[in-house]
Image (cartoon, grey):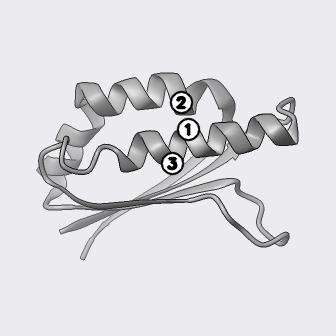
Amino acid sequence: MVKHIILWQLKDELSEEEKKNVMAGIKEGLEGLKGVVPGLIEIHVQTEKLASSNADVLLDSTLESEEALKGYAVHPAHVNVADTKVRPFTKSRVCIDYEL
């Protein structure tokens, strides 16, 4: 199994209300991929955080294998969520992938 963890920071120019809406869209979009993308075992998006945090959104996902991760990256449903709900609103992305 493979863990795929991402942290995003949202763009500074977004209002607090816009950030809440964007985070809800990211969560709904990405968590909606379970059962759609082959090899995606678990997916959770965390948007609630403590004030000490310096990231806005966390993606914690588990996939069957490194091949499944590669397939997830290019799967049309994932690409659609990334292109419409994530990339237009984020200023930074940090990722770590590792085998369990």
Between residue 43 and residue 53, name the one nearer to us.
43
Give the CA distance from mark 2 to mark 1.
Answer: 6 Å
- Asked whether disc 1 touches disc 3, contact meaning CB atoms under 8 Å apart, the reply is yes
- Say left or right for 89 vs 75: right
Earlier along the polypeptide chain: callout 3 or callout 2? 3
Give the CA distance from mark 1 to mark 3.
Answer: 5 Å
Q: Given the image, on which type of amino acid does mark 2 rest? A: Lys
Image quarter of residue 53: bottom right
Quadrant housing the C terminus: bottom left
Name above or below for residue 42 compared with residue 92. below
- Say left or right for 99 vs 97: left
- Asked whether disc 2 touches disc 1, contact meaning CB atoms under 8 Å apart, the reply is yes
Question: Mark 3 packing: few (<14 Cα in 10 Å), some, or many (20+)?
Answer: many
Give the residue drawn at x 25%, y 25%. 76
Name above or below for residue 18 compared with residue 95. above
Q: Given the image, on which type of amino acid does mark 3 rest? A: Lys
Q: Is residue 92 visible?
A: no
Report helix, strand or loop for mark 2. helix
Q: Position of residue 43 (x, y in %)?
A: 35, 59
Give the residue drawn at x 18%, y 49%. 35
Q: Which residue is mark 1?
A: 25
Tell me the tag on residue 27.
Answer: 3
Q: Position of residue 71 (x, y in %)?
A: 17, 39
Report helix, strand or loop for mark 3. helix
Name above or below for residue 96 compared with residue 37. below
Q: Given the image, on which type of amino acid does mark 1 rest? A: Gly
Q: Which residue is mark 2?
A: 85
